[in-house]
Image: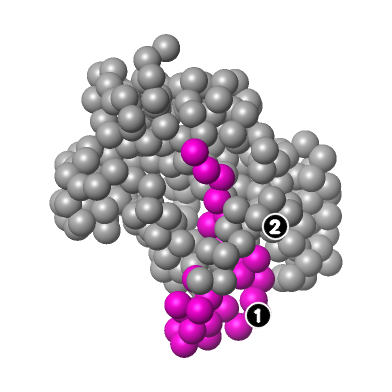
Amino acid sequence: MTPAEDWIAHYEATDERDRLTAAPGGRLEFIRTQELLARFLPPPPAVILDVGGAAGIHAAPLATNGYEIHLIDPVPLHVEQASAVPGLASATIGDARNLDRPDASVDAVLLLGPLYHLTERADRVAALAEARRVLRLGGVVAAAIISRYASTLDGLFRGYLRADGFEALVARDVGEGQHRNPDDVSGWFTTAYCHEPDEAPAEARDAGLDVEALVAIEGPAWLLPDLARWLNEDRDLLLRTIRRVETAPRLLGMSPHLLLVATKRAAL
């Protein structure tokens, strides 16, 4: 099975609709991603291409807020689920490296999954270059990446490192950035690429984009043993604390997800 077939099979067998709403870590990722999108995206009714948008979990509130959202995903199940999201302009099957959109036709492109499922650098640069192609001048790309050190921290705090096979997975993550879970062990994710924080800005620049920010999404807060209580009782304090260190260079790698924000300032 190729890497792409591997992760597509993973998503066909799981329900992505619940990932960001059920567990505390997913809730924090969702809340912070929406907060950052509100900060960096152009105002509605801008046209947004949500590439790798899965079941539409991030597209749904954006559509509610007045954006014109076109969702693209390579997983047929995701497109079927996203098609039921109220307010979406379209939901179609597609590939981040070859978008079926005219040049300069959208105001923003979301890549909240493709960069960590494209395991070769050339493919990630190609996806960013395609995003740039379909953007109007001044348009924004918001792209999520997984930290090179996410599995190390997850393994320590959840105890996965004591399980047979997990240390080898972590060693490869740290050494190569290549995350593999050949036995599809629940909770160990699927085939992915894990970035060093400074890699993604370099990839964006190679694609012709101007980098505006690299921001930790969850920051170190995802490691809280009582994260659910913080979200339920002290959410504002928690979010203020994350914002205070969201761009701190020494802490970026502690966040499981980071958001790269880049713009198309001029024609090539």
* Relative depth, front residue between 42 and 50: 42
- Circle 2 or circle 1, nearest the eye: 2
Q: Residues within 10 Å of mark 2 (few under 14, many from 20)?
A: some
Q: Residues within 10 Å of mark 1 (few under 14, many from 20)?
A: few
* Left or right, residue 128 beside residue 226: left
Q: Position of residue 169 (x, y in %)?
A: 77, 49
* Residue drawn 28% across the image and 39% down it: 48
Magenta region includes residue 210: no
Q: Which residues are magenta?
A: 212-239
Q: Which residue is mark 2?
A: 251
Prevailing SS of the magenta stretch: helix
- 190 or 101, which lies in front? 101
220 left or right of 114 in image: right
In terms of secondary structure, where does tag 2 sit?
loop
Give me the disc on residue 225. Answer: 1
| Tag 2: amino acid | Leu
Q: Is residue 156 above or below residue 124?
A: below
Q: Position of residue 160 (x, y in %)?
A: 76, 65
